[in-house]
Image (cartoon, rainbow, N blue to C red):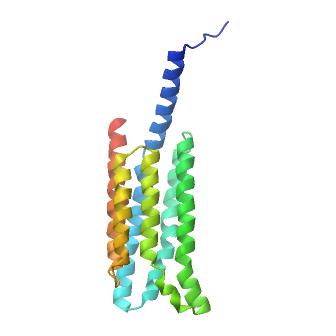
Amino acid sequence: MKEKELTQQESLALITKVIQDTREQTERSAGTPFLIWGYSTAILSILGWYLVNLTQNGAWFLIWFALPAIALPFQLRYNKQRDKGFSTVLDRMIGWVWGSLGFTAFVIASVNPISYYLFHYESTVVLNIFFMMALLMSLGTTITGGIIKSKIVSVAGIAGILCSISFLFIDGIDVSLWFGLLFYIMMVIPGHLLNYKTHKAHV
């Protein structure tokens, strides 16, 4: 039996549908990773501030290295659940963006403690970790918003980039609380809004 050839209009309609289905698959529960990392960061920011304030020992800020151990299991579980469907090009693109930024953030965050505790190089205090982490994660949020075409996420990311500049002028341990607040506004709120939007669309 001879297969029916598609007209130009039917071909365009099919391509549009495939693109739309791919984007919907990517958007479905897209807010969950923002909730995982946003809540984890906000909680650690409060815990780090409390421990440093209680002990007056800045070494407690090393608790930030527990972030991957806390958030990654939830992220991997989320990825496994999503993979039961199908992985799209947009999914892989977002994964590469956050993987690259996450690795960069880890390397930058490791410079101060490694230089100070292993080599006793004290001048590394000029490296403003909070500013650099806020800038990197805000950039990732902005890029993700552009990929999934979400104005909510894009605006949150741009606001984060602008607000990250303030960390150059905030002194003292309270910077940790402001850092947590930024992540709550930049990731947690958009994450809930995204999940609500996709849930409502598929009810």
* Marker count (numbered): 0
Q: Residue at x 56, y 67 (%)?
A: 104
Q: Residue at x 48, y 27 (%)?
A: 16
Identify the residue shown where x is 33% and y is 43%.
197
In the rendering, at what x and y percent does residue 134 appear?
42, 68
In the foreground, 16 or 74: 16
Q: In the image, is residue 156 above or below residue 108?
A: above
Q: Quadrant of residue 35?
A: bottom left
Residue drawn at (58%, 93%) of the image: 120
- Position of 72 compared to 181: left or right? right
State the image quarter where residue 178 is shown.
Answer: bottom left
Query: Which residue appears farthest toward the right when viewing the image?
Result: 1
- Is the residue 134 above or below the residue 28 in the image? below
Name the quarter where the N terminus is drawn. top right
Q: In which quadrant will I find the C terminus?
A: top left
Q: Quadrant of residue 34?
A: bottom left
Residue 97 horizontal/vertical position (percent): 54, 55
50 up-or-down from 137: above or below: below
Q: Is residue 46 visible?
A: no
Position of 125 relative to 145 (above/below): below
Tell me if residue 115 can be seen. yes
| Viewer-closest of 69 and 134 | 134
Q: Residue 23: x, y in percent?
A: 47, 38
63, 137: nearer the viewer: 137
